[in-house]
Image (cartoon, helix red, strand yellow):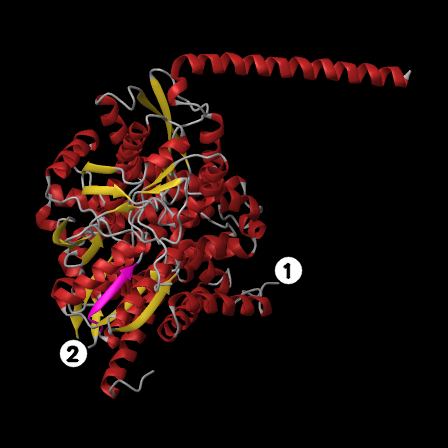
């Protein structure tokens, strides 16, 4: 299949393809981090994760309209403000949801699955009633569009690089929070042994609420960033949920490092196969590989070692 | 003893049955008398028709994934019904509609269509959007002899006596589009791309045959699962194969991702290197994609909101008066608008609401007031219509750059294309 092309063309296309894989990797990590925190640290299967993302997307849409109407001179930087507000909005909703019903369902993973699935349906219908059934178009500032040409054929999409930068920032922030801060230490203590953590004076209910809110907040930021590459509609969250769970489960539920490793493996495998095979076939093979690996290693790539 | 009891029971059951049967018969007679007295001559099969009113059904998804697409069709059908009523109704009867929600779920569509036909006895149903929903209701319409007006452009390969297809079937859209791009733009190589289900696959099959018949080359053909959001790999393949034309039949949320990523990857559509031709993006979809991302693409369809003719001006004005100034009207919305008008014309030609008579009257029904211009029902239940090429503008509208000289004949089972 490559005999028709010059080696320079091939080189540039492999570079582009490598870059496409990296973008997919960042997208996966961004989608999955929030879920990994909630699922991994709390054992709650949050089926409404996609809807929290879309909340961020709709917030971004509202902020962009606000800026276009009242502050057109600052339109270029609205995206950063939109991301912060998305984080706060999704986090606040997350805290509310945790307080109103998730906290009664801990230790009952199947019930949380059902409850959050119901929540996802409710949120979808709320979006539909408020914003209409049609997708909305989020206008991006000009500097986020287009690409930087490196050579004749290699062009780097700016929004892709933006997502990569954002993912890196958030991943580092989460790492610092979980492994270097006092709060993170408490979270990990609660995950490892809840009664013991409570016994040494950690307010586990409060830790749970903040953890859940943080996970939802990160989902909101992800949704906000995805307005650059995807659609914003009432049911758009459903487009991400399968990939998100795939990444988290494959990585090993309790490990953030596992999530990142699994996002990297899946994204590289998928984007390489997409190039050599057709899109649908690549997806099938990716899923098949993941299923087989999970059959051999049900705990996922990275599992936490705990004495049961 | 037990014997006695059994006999008694049996007798009781018999009396019970008798009385029920009698009641049913009496009821039927009353009903029949009422209908016979009122509208017997225009309604011999017990449809919901009175002296003043005729009931029809609207069956679309207003919840679930497909609500995005089907909302416009519901609006168009309601507008048409309202206008017909204002102009005196059908055979002097006002149209009353019963709306059911298919909820983007095919078994629900089947169940609701049965309800409309069996319980509500509607005289016609305007509805369905995806081929899957149409295939789900088709056996019901054929079994209970109903009439469905189906608005979406679709893959063809179907012709039911119980359906009038008011959108274009695949060849009408595809052949005209490819001929135009070959003749006007000198296109020689094509990259076919689509979402992975029956419509894009069948359409691309027809496109490929046609391209190869013209002696030109397809350099790639790709399908992605519905809802796929990452198109960077295929965009790289397009860059590598350097086709003259990207022929895109991507649908739904994937659309938005595809066009945004195409632009981000440095493929600028207004430069037409490569040129992008689509049959799946109407003005409705551009709302989600964003005009700035779609600018410069071409679409082959029978209707664009910007069509310059008096019918369309009146239609757009009425639509905006009804649903607000910001509303956009896509190809399918216009096709849905034709449904009630075509049904009215057929009923009046037949002089009856009877399904069989309406069906017999349907071929060769003309509509000179259609927003798209003139349409006519072919004996195969599809519409003769012109195909237009639209050039996407930044404001989310299409500018019509070409129109076929003749009406395109609908050909749901194209020979040599399967």
Name the secondary structure under disc 1.
loop
**Rendering coords of residue B135 (x, y %):** 44, 46
**Quadrant containing the N terminus of chain A in the rendered view:** bottom left
Q: Which mark is residue A308?
A: 1
Pointer 2: residues within 10 angstroms few (<14), some, or many (20+)? Answer: few
Pointer 1: residues within 10 angstroms few (<14), some, or many (20+)? Answer: few
The chain identifier of the residue carrying mark 1 reads: A
Q: Main secondary structure of the magenta part?
A: strand
Same subunit: marks 1 and 2: yes
Tell me the quarter of the picture where residue A5 sits.
Answer: bottom left
Q: Nearer the viewer, residue A110 or B143?
A: B143
Q: Is residue B276 visible?
A: yes
* Residue farthest to the left, as pictured: A73
Residue shown at 54%/42% (left/top)? A105
Image: A105 above or below A169:
above
**Rendering coords of residue A165 (x, y %):** 27, 65
* Residue farthest to the right, as pictured: B1
In this rendering, position of residue B229 left or right of residue B102: left
Question: Distance between the Cα atoms at labels 1 and 2?
Answer: 58 Å
**Quadrant containing the C terminus of chain A in the rendered view:** bottom right
The stretch of residues the image draws in magenta is B243-249
Residue shown at 40%/57% (left/top)? B197
Q: Disc 2 marks which residue? A: A152
Q: Is residue B325 visible?
A: no
Q: Nearer the viewer, residue B108 or B310?
A: B310
Residue shown at 41%/35% (left/top)? B101
Q: Earlier in the sequence, mark 1 or mark 2?
A: 2
**Rendering coords of residue B180 (x, y %):** 17, 62
Q: Nearer the viewer, residue B164 or B201?
A: B164
Image: B252 above or below A250:
above
**Residue B314 on the magenta segment:** no
């Amino acid at each position: 299949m490559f005999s028709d092309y010059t080696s320079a063309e091939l080189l540039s296309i492999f570079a582009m393809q490598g870059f496409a894989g990296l973008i997919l990797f960042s997208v996966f990590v961004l989608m999955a981090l929030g879920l990994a925190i909630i699922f991994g640290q709390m054992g709650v299967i949050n089926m409404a994760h996609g809807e929290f993302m879309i909340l961020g997307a709709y917030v971004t849409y509202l902020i962009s309209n606000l800026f276009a109407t009242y502050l057109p001179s600052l339109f270029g930087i609205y995206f950063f403000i939109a991301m912060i507000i998305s984080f706060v909005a999704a986090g606040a909703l997350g805290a509310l949801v945790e307080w109103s019903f998730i906290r009664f369902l801990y230790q009952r993973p199947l019930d949380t699955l059902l409850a959050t699935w119901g929540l996802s349906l409710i949120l979808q219908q709320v979006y539909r009633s408020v914003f209409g059934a049609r997708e909305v178009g989020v206008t991006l500032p000009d500097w986020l569009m287009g690409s930087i040409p490196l050579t004749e054929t290699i062009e780097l999409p700016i929004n892709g690089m933006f997502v990569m930068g954002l993912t890196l920032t958030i991943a580092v922030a989460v790492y610092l929070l979980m492994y270097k801060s006092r709060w993170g230490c408490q979270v990990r203590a609660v995950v490892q042994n809840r009664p013991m953590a409570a016994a040494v004076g950690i307010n586990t209910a409060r830790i749970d609420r903040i953890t859940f809110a943080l996970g939802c907040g990160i989902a909101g930021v992800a949704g906000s960033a995805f307005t650059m590459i995807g659609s914003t509609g009432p049911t758009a969250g459903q487009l991400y949920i399968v990939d998100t769970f795939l990444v988290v489960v494959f990585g090993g539920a309790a490990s953030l490092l596992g999530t990142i490793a699994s996002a990297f493996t899946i994204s590289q495998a998928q984007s390489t196969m997409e190039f050599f095979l057709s899109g649908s076939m690549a997806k099938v093979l990716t899923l098949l590989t993941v299923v087989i690996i999970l059959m051999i290693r049900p705990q996922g790539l990275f599992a936490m070692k705990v004495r049961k | 003893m037990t014997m006695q009891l059994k006999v008694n029971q049996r007798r009781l059951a018999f009396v019970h049955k008798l009385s029920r049967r009698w009641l049913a018969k009496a009821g039927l007679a009353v009903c029949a008398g009422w209908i016979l007295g009122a509208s017997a001559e225009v309604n011999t099969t017990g449809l919901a028709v009175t002296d003043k009113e005729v009931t029809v059904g609207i069956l679309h998804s207003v919840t679930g994934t497909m609500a995005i697409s089907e909302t416009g069709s519901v609006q168009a059908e309601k507008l048409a019904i309202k206008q017909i009523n204002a102009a005196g109704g059908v055979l002097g009867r006002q149209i009353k509609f019963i709306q059911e929600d298919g909820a983007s779920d095919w078994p629900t569509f089947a169940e609701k269509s049965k309800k409309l036909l069996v319980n509500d006895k509607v005289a016609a149903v305007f509805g369905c959007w995806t081929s899957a929903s149409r295939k789900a209701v088709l056996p019901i319409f054929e079994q209970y002899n109903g009439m469905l007006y189906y608005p979406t452009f679709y893959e063809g390969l179907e012709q039911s006596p119980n359906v009038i297809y008011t959108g274009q079937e695949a060849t009408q859209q595809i052949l005209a589009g490819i001929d135009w791009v070959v003749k006007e733009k000198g296109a020689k190589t094509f990259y076919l791309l689509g979402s992975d289900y029956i419509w894009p696959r069948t359409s691309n099959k027809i496109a490929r045959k046609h391209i190869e018949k013209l002696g030109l080359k397809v350099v790639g053909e790709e399908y992605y699962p519905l809802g796929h959001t990452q198109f960077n790999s295929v965009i790289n393949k397009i860059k590598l194969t350097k086709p003259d034309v990207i022929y895109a039949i991507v649908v739904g949320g994937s659309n938005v991702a595809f066009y945004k990523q195409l632009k981000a990857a440095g493929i600028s559509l207004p430069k037409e290197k490569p040129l992008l031709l689509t049959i799946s993006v109407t003005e409705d979809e551009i709302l989600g994609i964003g005009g700035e991302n779609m600018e410069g693409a071409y679409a082959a369809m029978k209707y664009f909101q910007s069509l310059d003719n008096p019918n369309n001006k009146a239609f757009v004005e009425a639509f905006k008066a009804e649903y607000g100034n910001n509303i956009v009207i896509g190809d399918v919305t216009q096709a849905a608008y034709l449904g009630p008008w075509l049904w009215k014309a057929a009923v009046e030609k037949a002089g009856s609401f009877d399904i069989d008579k309406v069906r017999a009257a349907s071929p060769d029904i003309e509509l000179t007031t259609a927003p798209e211009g003139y349409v006519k029902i072919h004996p195969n239940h599809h519409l003769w219509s012109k195909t237009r090429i639209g050039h996407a503008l930044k404001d989310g509208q299409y500018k019509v750059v070409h129109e076929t000289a003749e009406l395109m004949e609908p050909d749901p089972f194209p020979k040599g294309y399967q």
